[in-house]
Amino acid sequence: MAEVKMWWDKNKKLKPTAPPPPPTVTWRPEGEEDPAASLAAARPEFGEHGGVNLSIENSITFTVMEAEMMRKMFEGELGLEQDFFIYSRHFNPTVMALGRAMAALEGTEAAYCTSSGMAAVSSVLLQLVSSGGHIVASRTLYGGTHALLSHFLPRVCNITTSFVDVKDHAMVRDAMVKGKTKVLYFETVANPTLTVANVPELSRMAHEKGVTVVVDNTFSPMIISPTRLGADVVVHSCSKFISGGADIIAGAVCGSKKLVNSMMDLHQGTLMLLGPTMNAKVASELSQRVPHLALRMKEHSHRALVFAQRMKNLGLKVIYPGLKDHPDHHLLSSIANKDYGYGGVLCIDMGTEERANRLMNLLQNHTHFGLLAVSLGYFETLMSCSGSSTSSEMNVEEKELAGISPGLIRMSVGYVGTLEQKWSQLEKALLKLNI
């Protein structure tokens, strides 16, 4: 790794001609396959006066010293490489710094941070697929993404989607039509069923047919690195584990420099023209949370595994890829980054929505184990019945095909309190329900 150059003199004052921040590209250092190591090896971002925290660039517009410079900036002669900014809907220094961290996290050349996870998903798909194009997607997806693919894109953009079981590789291969299918889209760990995608094999099949692989890695940051396994693009809802505080809406697109530049094209770029811009204050907040994401993911995963094993021993139908009898346990073990566990989300299938609701009511209102709320990645445990909440955009048949039963509880396991304290609260609720 190159030596880090400090940009201030011995008196801690910025030099008049301080070097500009680098462009959006962030290469993963050779040999740095662990995401935490990549983040640590990435160039640090200092504050304006040498502060240890990144400065927040609140401005939406930026001055030029001479009138002729503005023409050169709009013509592309002057740009980010020379530390020239025009307008924060295009690029903002604080948001760019977070983008460099996200690129290091995912091991991609570049990343662009957006106002939400759905903004990231929709911007990527609309950039890669034109009117009349075709997408192959997993039938088990976040409900909002499923609605985008099944309803919005066909109506507004004449883009169609074939939904497949990503575990059935022959089905996936047959659904992709060379020359017509532009994107294969799936989640590394599916929401909410927790099936695990074979990223290397799916990527290989897609690339044989000239198809771009876009992967949603929201459920498994740090745990899985999709581009290292062959995927082309990674999208995130940073509102979840990356934020960790249930107080920020944000997203990210991680991919090649060519892709990100195309999405920022003045005439054809979805990020440029649709305006899913991240606020600089949000970027600053997230920049201070990414460094301890590894520690948080390890604790989420550890507690989820312990609770899953203990509930399984009590006879509950628990779905968690960390359990050895989970059908994807060996697959996840083979593709996961070492030491981050199997994820912070588990599912309990109570059979019926009524029984699921009874258990969740007890867990929130009697034993105070967790909160009845959607989303995930929070430091408190969050619970919801997926079929009637985050997957409610899907009809009954679509839910059945996706494996979402009426009584499926999705539980994002938090880390507040001691593990034994929280287990006692969970166990009391289960006993009261006569499990």
Image (cartoon, helix red, strand yellow):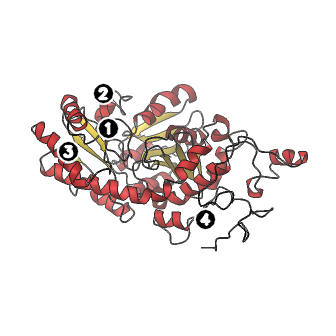
Sequence order check, earlier mark of 4 and 3: 4
Q: At 32% across and 38% down in the image, what residue appears? A: 402
Residue 43: which numbered mark, if any?
4
Residue 151 image offset from top left, x and y in percent = 47, 27
Instruction: Name the residue that disc number 1 marks.
Output: 402
Q: Are marks 4 and 3 in contact (CB under 8 Å)?
A: no
Label 4 neighbour load within 10 Å: few <14, some 14-19, many 20+? some
* Cα distance in 3D space between marks 4 and 3: 43 Å
Say above or below: 256 vs 369: below
Instruction: Name the residue that disc number 2 marks.
Output: 396
Say which amino acid is labelled 4: Arg
In the picture, residue 87 is in which quadrant?
top right
Q: Secondary structure at mark 4?
A: loop
Q: Is residue 21 left or right of residue 413?
A: right
Sequence order check, earlier mark of 3 and 2: 2
Label 2 neighbour load within 10 Å: few <14, some 14-19, many 20+? some
Residue 84 image offset from top left, x and y in percent = 77, 51
Say above or below: 44 vs 428: below
